[in-house]
Structure formats: C-alpha cells, structure tokens
C-alpha cells in the first residue's frame, strides 16, 4: 500500500473567499434549490455554499456573476 500523507497544518486552498453572514439564504443558480451555507471553520476547505441537489459548491463571487 502506498504511503498517505497530509499537511500539518492543513492547506486551505483559497482563504479569501467572501463568507456571508450566518442566516443568509440563497438559491442554486443551476436548479433553484435552497442551498446550505457551510460554516467557515479552519478545517473546512471548500466554498461557502453547497447545493444538496446538484452536489455542487459555489462562492459568493460565482453567485454574483450568475
């Protein structure tokens, strides 16, 4: 089996994502489903918004351009 390593501390791929205030709601630009706002935790490496139907993540910047 190959060795598996992780970085310590973990790498956040893009730290400067604009994060909306807690309680903000948005609909998916692809399917118009209400999206989930993820918490901005140190251990979370994705974008703020998650669409459970499309299984896709969105940033505030992407939603503003849609």
Image: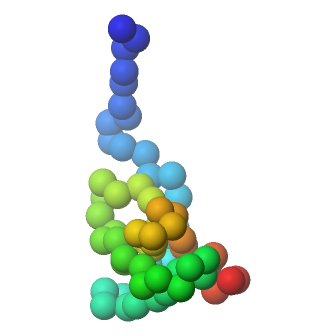
- Quadrant of the image occupied by residue 48: bottom left
Left or right of 46 in this view: 23: left
Residue furthest right as drawn: 65
Residue at horizontal 30 percent and vertical 71 percent from the top: 39
Would residue 17 be found to the left or right of residue 20 on screen?
right
Which residue is painted at 31% across and 86% down in the image? Answer: 22
Direction from residue 45 to residue 32 in the image, left or right? right
Residue 30 on image: x %, y %:
61, 77
Image position, residue 34 (x, y; %): 42, 84
Q: Residue furthest top?
A: 1
| Nearest to the observer: residue 23 or residue 11 | 23
So how many labels did they put on this image? 0
| Residue 32, position as x, y percentages in the image | 53, 85
Front-most of residues 18 and 51: 51
Q: Is residue 1 found left or right of 59 in the rendered image?
A: left
Look at the image and tell me whether residue 20 can be seen: no
- Residue at 34% from the left image edge and 71% from the top image edge: 38
* Colour style of the rendered protein structure: rainbow
Q: Position of residue 1 (x, y in %)?
A: 36, 8
5 relative to 35, above or below: above
Q: Is residue 66 visible?
A: yes
Q: Quadrant of residue 59?
A: bottom right
Front-lying residue, 22 or 57? 57
Q: Is residue 42 above or below residue 36?
A: above
Quadrant in which the C terminus is drawn: bottom right
Q: Is residue 25 above or below residue 11?
A: below
Residue at image point 36% right, 24% down: 5
């Amino acid at each position: 089996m190959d060795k598996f390593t992780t970085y310590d501390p973990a790498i956040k791929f893009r730290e400067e994502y604009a994060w909306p205030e807690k309680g903000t709601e948005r609909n998916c630009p692809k399917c118009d489903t209400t999206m989930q706002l993820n918490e901005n935790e140190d251990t979370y490496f994705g974008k703020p918004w998650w669409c459970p139907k499309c299984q896709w993540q969105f940033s505030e910047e992407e939603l503003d351009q849609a």
